[in-house]
Image: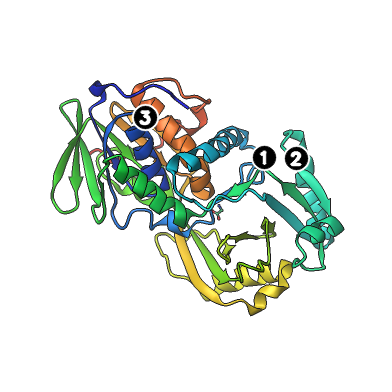
Amino acid sequence: MISDSIPSSVGRVLVVGGGICGLAVAWRLAQAGADVAVFDAGEPGRGATWAAGGMLAATLEAEPGEEAMLGLARWSQDLWPRWAEALGAPVGYRDEGTVHLAVGRDELAALHHRLRYLRRLALPIEWWDAAPLREREPALSPDVLGAIASPGDHQVDPRAVVPALLAALSAAGVPVEAGAPVAAIEPEGGGWRVHLGDGRRERADHVVLAAGAWTGRISGWPAPPVHPAKGQAIVLETDPAAPLLRHVVWGAGIYLVPRADGRLYVGATVEDRGFDRQPTAGGVLSLLQAAWRILPGLEELPVVELVTGLRPRSRDDLPIVGPVGPGLHVATGHHRNGILLAPATAELVLAGILGRPAPVDDTPFRPARFAGRIESRMDA
Ligand code: GLY
């Protein structure tokens, strides 16, 4: 973590967007002594963050060609326990780990392929055959043939993280304004003028644009390409005294996240549907079919909620974090990893505001990678 405190010359920082990354940035800046405020278009923390599974799955999310992302994700994963403790309120942190399992020969072959890839990266994983797997998770289908176990891929409950962050911000004296959409920004006198939807104007020395999938809709800056990736999920209810699962469980096209209070989160689709947030029968069907194959006992469980959220997805699937120009910073594009990457994002934005080198190589995540292809909205 960056230990420097913010000099008073940094001035006033406005964070646009009160999802987990915006709130995390604001909290980190407040800890460093900044004068910071947050504006959220709706209810802070109630967008993609509220809909998220909360998996801190740096290892199992590793994808070929995205090794830079792995470094960032593992750093953020390491920051999470300290971060959770510093928040000073329960955030549903569970450290039983995650298993990625296979049903049928084809999935088993694909999983072995993945196992070899993760082993080449020297990631902390184990292989569990069917018998030890079912010993640890007896409710799994007898058709499950084996799993990659990732003991370091933990979870938090985003619906506990949000109130914890808001309480920490309130204790730090940071105003977080709900129902305050930002329509545009414009440079003014070495700083920025922030135009709110209700006609108000706010002056800032630094602006951090962290409005998730909506970040590119704010006018007056060269927005990098970010678009919504719809996710549908289902929340089921289990008896917390007799939970069906202990680990986070991944299968083909599905993951199951058991919460300590008995809720079982079944997620999630990844759909290109613009800003549509309507749950659909097709989405629910695909989730339940995939979940039922690995956990047949879920048939009997009450449905508590259908959840949809819009992940902010960049053109290259990597987060977009860092300075865009003097006093202007962006933190979006976290796609499937917003909860995981919140602590690292806060550190990167702090480094950018201080004009310090980032604690990790942040070159792949800088907005400048889209230079020349960005859509200039300075005149919009
Ligand atoms: N983190 C998994 C997802 O976005 O569905």
Residue of label 1: 64
Quadrant for ligand 1? bottom right
The residue closer to the viewer here, 95 or 193, is: 95
* Residues under numbered marks 1 and 2 in contact, where contact means CB atoms less than 8 Å apart: yes
Which numbered mark, 1 or 3, is in the foreground of this view? 3
Apparent side of residue 19 relative to residue 150 in the rendered image (left or right): left
Residue of label 2: 117
Which badge, 1 or 2, is on the more N-terminal residue? 1
Q: Amino acid at mark 3?
A: Pro
Residue 284 percent across, percent down from the top left: 56, 72
Residue 313 in the image: above or below residue 251? above
Which badge, 3 or 2, is on the more N-terminal residue? 2
Residue of label 3: 323
Residue 89 percent across, percent down from the top left: 44, 48
Label 2 residue SS? helix
CA–CA distance between discs 1 and 2? 8 Å
The residue closer to the viewer here, 330 or 255, is: 255
Corner quadrant of residue 239: bottom right
Residue at position x 67%, y 49% in the image: 97
